[in-house]
Image (cartoon, rainbow, N blue to C red):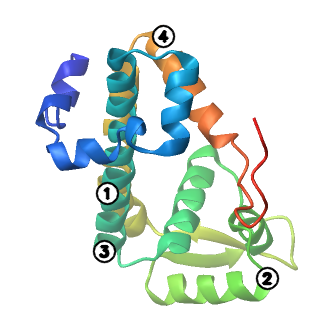
C-alpha cells in the first residue's frame, strides 16, 4: 500500500486556513525573524518549515484524540492504559510481572500501584495470581477479555501508525527520526532567567 494512501486523509499545506498558517510564520515573531535573516533562509525554505511544524501540531492533536478515544472506549485513564499495555507485552513475551515491576515501569510508588491494581482488578482487567517461583509475591496477568479489547483498539491504532512508517523510505525515516530526536533533546528553558546572548 502506498504512502500517499495513508496520508490522503490529512490536510494538505494549501488547505490550511490562512489564519492558522499565518500564526506559524516565523517571520512574524521578533526572535525567529532574526534567525530567518541570520540563516539566510529563502521564502521557500520558510514555507517548508511552516508545513513541517503544522504537520507536527496536527500529529499532536491527532495522537491525543486517538488516545482519548481509546481511554474512553476502555474506560481507563492514561496510567491504567500504560499498565495494560505493559502486561500485554509481558504476556506475549512469556514474562512474569509483579507489582514492583509495574510500579517501576510506571514510575509510581508501591501504594499507588496497589490502588491502580485494585481498580483494574475490580473492573475485570487484570488478575492477581500466585507467583510460580516466589511465594512472597503475586504475578499480575491481564485478562483475556481486556487483551482482546485492547488489541482491537490500541493494537489497531498502533498497526496503522506502523504501516505509515513502514511505507516511508529508509532515508525518510532517518530524517524524521533525526528531527524528532533533536527536538526532544532541546533543554527546557528557565524563562525566569535572563536571556543568553547568541
Please report contact status of discs 3 and 1: CB closer than 8 Å, yes or no. Answer: no
Whole-number angstrom distance, CA of label 3 to CA of label 4: 35 Å
Can residue 163 be seen by looking at this rendering? no
List x then y, in percent, for residue 166: 39, 21
Task: From this view, report whether residue 190 is shown above or below residue 3.
Answer: below
Local packing at callout 2 (Cα closer than 10 Å; few below 14, some 14-19, many 20+) is some
Please report contact status of discs 4 and 2: CB closer than 8 Å, yes or no. Answer: no
N-terminal-most mark, 3 or 4: 3
Task: From this view, report whether residue 102 is shown above or below residue 185.
Answer: below
Give the residue number, with chain letter if any, for mark 4. Answer: 170
What quarter of the picture does the C terminus occupy?
Answer: top right
Give the residue number, with chain letter if any, for mark 1. Answer: 66
Residue 176 left/right relative to 133: left
Q: Secondary structure at mark 3?
A: helix
Q: Which residue is at 79% across, 46% downward?
A: 196
Whole-number angstrom distance, CA of label 4 to CA of label 2: 42 Å
Residue closer to the observer: 10 or 126: 10
N-terminal-most mark, 4 or 2: 2
What quarter of the picture does the N terminus occupy?
Answer: top left
List x then y, in percent, for residue 181: 63, 33
N-terminal-most mark, 3 or 1: 1
> How many marks can you see?
4
Amino acid at each position: 500500500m502506498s504512502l500517499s494512501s495513508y496520508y490522503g486523509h490529512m490536510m494538505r499545506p494549501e488547505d490550511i486556513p490562512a489564519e492558522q498558517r499565518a500564526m506559524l510564520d516565523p517571520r512574524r515573531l521578533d526572535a525567529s525573524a532574526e534567525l530567518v535573516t541570520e540563516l539566510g533562509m529563502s521564502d521557500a525554505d520558510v514555507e517548508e518549515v511552516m508545513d513541517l511544524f503544522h504537520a507536527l501540531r496536527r500529529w499532536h492533536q491527532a495522537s491525543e484524540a486517538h488516545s482519548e478515544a481509546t481511554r474512553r472506549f476502555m474506560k481507563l485513564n492514561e496510567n491504567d492504559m500504560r499498565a495494560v499495555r505493559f502486561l500485554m507485552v509481558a504476556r506475549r513475551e512469556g514474562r512474569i510481572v509483579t507489582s514492583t515491576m509495574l510500579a517501576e515501569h510506571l514510575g509510581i510508588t508501591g501504594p499507588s500501584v496497589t490502588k491502580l491494581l485494585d481498580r483494574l482488578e475490580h473492573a475485570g482487567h487484570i488478575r492477581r495470581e500466585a507467583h510460580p517461583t516466589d511465594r512472597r509475591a503475586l504475578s499480575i496477568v491481564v485478562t483475556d477479555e481486556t487483551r482482546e479489547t485492547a488489541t482491537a483498539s490500541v493494537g489497531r491504532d498502533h498497526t496503522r501508525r506502523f504501516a505509515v512508517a513502514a511505507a516511508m523510505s529508509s532515508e525518510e525515516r532517518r530524517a524524521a527520526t533525526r528531527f524528532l530526536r533533536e527536538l526532544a533533546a532541546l533543554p527546557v528553558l528557565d524563562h525566569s532567567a535572563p536571556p543568553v546572548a547568541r
